[in-house]
Amino acid sequence: MSNVINQSPNSFVDDVAQHFMQHHPAPSLAELQQWRPARSQWDLARRLQTLLSPFQKREVALSDTHIKYLIGGNTKGPTVLLLHGFGANKENWLFMSSFLTRHYRVIIPDLPGFGESSFHPELDYRLTNQAQRISHFVAAVSDEPVHVVGNSMGGAISAILAAHHGEQVASLGLMNSAGFRGSRPSLFEQRLIDGENPLIPSNYEEVSSLFDITTYAHTRLLRLFITPIIYKDFIHRSPVNHRLFSDALEINEGIEKIFEDINCPTLVLWGNKDAVLDVSCVEATQQHLPTAQVKILSNIGHLPMLESPLKSARIYKRFWQSI
């Protein structure tokens, strides 16, 4: 997910709005009202993943949406909340989360509008609204503050949650997180300005190439084995993802103000081969959150939880134990 919560003059979000949305306007409300989830091979794979995992699938009904989530692990341990990025889903965390369940109670939702959680075209999916919904979700599933980790767009939502609802957040994990723009443009940013969005593929080839930009380790393996299973779901969700991306571009709060209000212990984890959000974003994040711990993973791209799940889990466990 791009640095979509930067509100400074001539910011990157202005480039995105001008270039990408000019080429790809969001579908109309009437079009989206006709959209319905469709069954695909990915549904079967998703069910199989859950059956083979230590998690159970549950659902929470909020005032304006339904959130599907996975829950498992040590019921007596601290609670960990994992938030996925744009176009992704809760299953992205299954590899890493399996290394957390011995000591932690782990909760993994599909963010509102994504995955198996409900999408309502009349709702506003700007990031501050998403954070508010996640706050209601946390209140429904946990009686204690949670260790929240967010990847990409999920990182931006996690930061807003920590700033606006600090009493619910024991610690903040920013994993290749959307937020501040780095000093070097990423491949994803360059393609967005050219009017393309690799995160919203519309055919088999684009779904396959999605792994080239989101991962660095195991890219070929992921592309060969996952693309045939998931491509139809990506293509079917393309109009919904266009709308969700458009809403994420609507800025209603500056990132600097958000980071000023974050008071919990924070760990910034980043893959140094990230082609979506360049690792130089870490420097900008540190400038506004100097107390944060930082870990850079070598030869890892945008999705450390998939590319290096054991190492990522160990880093977060040490961080939480130090708190």
Image (cartoon, rainbow, N blue to C red):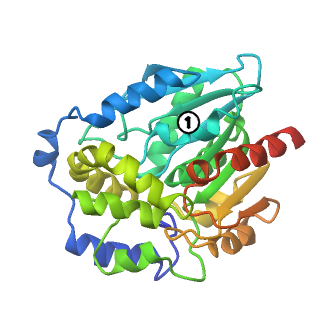
Residue at horizontal 27 percent and vertical 43 percent from the top: 233
Of residue 196 and residue 120, the one placed in the foreground of this image is 196
Numbered label tally: 1
Residue 4 in picture, x, y percent from top left: 46, 65
Of residue 150 and residue 91, the one placed in the foreground of this image is 91
SS type, badge 1:
helix
Residue at horizontal 69 percent and vertical 41 percent from the top: 166
Residue 103 in picture, x, y percent from top left: 77, 26
Residue 173 in picture, x, y percent from top left: 69, 49
Of residue 80 and residue 224, the one placed in the foreground of this image is 224
Q: Quadrant of residue 170?
A: top right
**Is 238 left, or right, of 47 in this rendering?**
left
Q: Mark 1 belongs to which amino acid?
A: Leu
The answer to whether one can see residue 249 in this image is no
Q: Which residue is mark 1?
A: 94
Q: Is residue 248 above or below residue 90?
A: below
**Is 133 left, or right, of 87 in this rendering?**
right
Residue at horizontal 50 percent and vertical 54 percent from the top: 153
Residue at horizontal 71 percent and vertical 43 percent from the top: 313
Neighbor class of circle 1 (other Cα within 10 Å; few <14, some 14-19, many 20+) is: some
Q: Quadrant of residue 251?
A: bottom left
Q: Is residue 238 above or below residue 1?
A: above
Q: Is residue 43 above or below residue 96?
A: above
**Is 27 left, or right, of 67 in this rendering?**
left
Residue 179 in picture, x, y percent from top left: 57, 64
- For the view shown, which residue lies furthest in the right direction? 322
